[in-house]
Image (tube, helix red, strand yellow):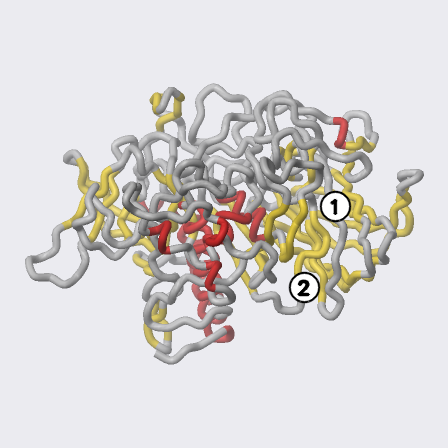
Amino acid sequence: MPLFRFCFALALGLSLVSSASAQLPSAYDLRSVATPLGNVAWVSDIQDQGTAEDCWTFASALAMDSSLLMQGVLPTGSTAPAPMVSSWHLSVANGNPNQIIPGQAFGSNSNWGGFEYMALGYVTRGSGLWTIPGNYNPATHVTTLGGGPVSNAANPANVFPSVISNYDGNDNDFVPNPLTPLLPPTNQPTAWRATKVSILDQGFSTNVALPTPTGTESIGGSSYHTYSYTLGAADPQVQAVKEAILANGAVTTSMNAQYSAFVSVQNPTGSLVPYSVNYVNPKTATGYSDHEVAIIGWNDNYTITSGGNTTTGAWLVQNSWGTNYWNGTNADPNDGTFWAAYDDAVIGRSGVASFQMASMDKYTQTVLQNELGPMEYAGNFEVIGGVGYNFVGSPTGMAPIEASSVRSILTPTTNTRLGALGLATQIANVEVNASIYEWNPGTQTLGSLLTSATFTNDSIGFFLGELPESLILNGGQSYAVQLAYSQGGSPILGAAPMTIGGSGINGYLTVNAGLSYCLNPTTGQWEDLDSLSFTAFSGSGPNAKGGILFLKGYGTVPEPTSLALVGMAAAALCGRQLLRRRRTA
């Protein structure tokens, strides 16, 4: 199968997207997409996470791979290629202190799991070695982290180590102690950039609404709402996920692995075809999740029978457990995928993220940067989860701020050329007007308006907005990026995403003054967000102080530069309650 790249893949992808809302195909499989050049694979091959609790990094990297293959940035052929986006680098360099694998025997204090919004923060960070603000003991605290994403092809150390994927917990198996020799270099050039990351969880903000709860159920000592999903292929959430797959490739999703059964569907005797596997969730009607995988296709006519009940319509899901771990044994060969019903309460409904990736193109690495986030837990809990909370969760993993206008102060260390802003919204279909002014730190007043642009984000999550023309910023000069959020022409509160307590790294990190402000809608005064405190739960602790606006800047060729870390802060001025985190294995 000859290789092909951007033009054809992009044209075909656009044709699929344009027809998606009119008529979604009844079956689709990213492993074999029909094109005029034959069937091609727009998804990378199966990986094995072993006993590492890194499922979220494998699912996220797979989704990024899929987008790059679909856009023609990576060459594709008739079979699934080797994974290119490094899940290993994402695992150990994302910046969450609970994610850093320490120099101890594997399994004694390894990764705790993660979330799709942590992948969002990682993929938009940019290259280089990012120094975490503060004076910390390097023996006990995380002091630096890497940019991302990086390529498996660029360095063999980026590939997930086979010694870990083959480790089954047996004391006779050898795992290096310490693991330091296996860690990939932190300071690497970013291989690709994200132009959009959409969070599609059902029930979040302006996403597809949840049905009426049918009751509650207790799992692990916590109470969860229960729901009933019976619409099959006609379900609006199912249709939204399908459209995202047609547009950008595989999407991530949470699931219940702990409370589930994988049932092998026996093939005819002598068949060389691997067994098919159906996923049956006995806790179907809950929002609890403990595993992250990727949806790579669907079939509206596939049936799954369990307990005498048959449902029609299923997702094709790719896992990261290799090809031999099914039905509780290592005996059943499989292709590493399984089928899950559309009516599952978690798969395709929670932890759903769609990554739109691109080459670096005309952009340099990230040159303006908020202080690292989102890195920690800030109330990102599945809306279909907890019972009895006032706060329904933050889709991007950051707290919303109850102001329609916010301001971030940027001070580049050297002259640089700013070409685009990386922003995020907590609400879909939001307009963001960005105005960049000169700033006088002494008087805290705006100077001349340098440029402005208005962007629209049609989904919750991250997006890249290009400025009308690149703007030259002078080293040592301070600038104010002022963002005004609106919907339907009216100012809207709660759309700006903020990371609580600085970046949430190393516990109770506070925020410096003079970096971030919001316009108080009650008093009409601009307030420095370093003064705000959080008493509800956050990853930064029960008394986190201030926060950071999710704001990034992207430089254009030919003038890449280095800027000082900048930031903004976050708080819920209306006192929204933050929930306890969920953990994904």
List x then y, in percent, for residue 463: 61, 52
Residue 438 versus residue 207: which sits nearer the camera? Answer: 438
* Residue 510 x %, y %: 71, 31
As drawn, which residue projects farthest toward the left?
Answer: 269
Q: Residue at x 91, y 48 (%)?
A: 447
Q: Nearer the viewer, residue 112 or 169?
A: 169
Question: Which numbered circle lies on residue 566?
Answer: 1
How far apart are the two marked residues, 2 and 1, measured between alpha carbons? 18 Å
The crowding category of the residue bearing disc 1, from other C-alpha atoms within 10 Å (few below 14, some 14 to 19, many at least 20), is: many
Secondary structure found at label 2: strand
Q: Amino acid at mark 1?
A: Val
Tell me, yes or no, if residue 480 can be seen here.
yes
**For the residue carrying disc 2, how many other residues have a C-alpha within 10 Å: few (<14), some (14-19), or many (20+)?**
many
Query: Is residue 317 visible to us here?
Result: no
Residue under pointer 2:
364
The residue located at (41%, 49%) in the rendering is 176
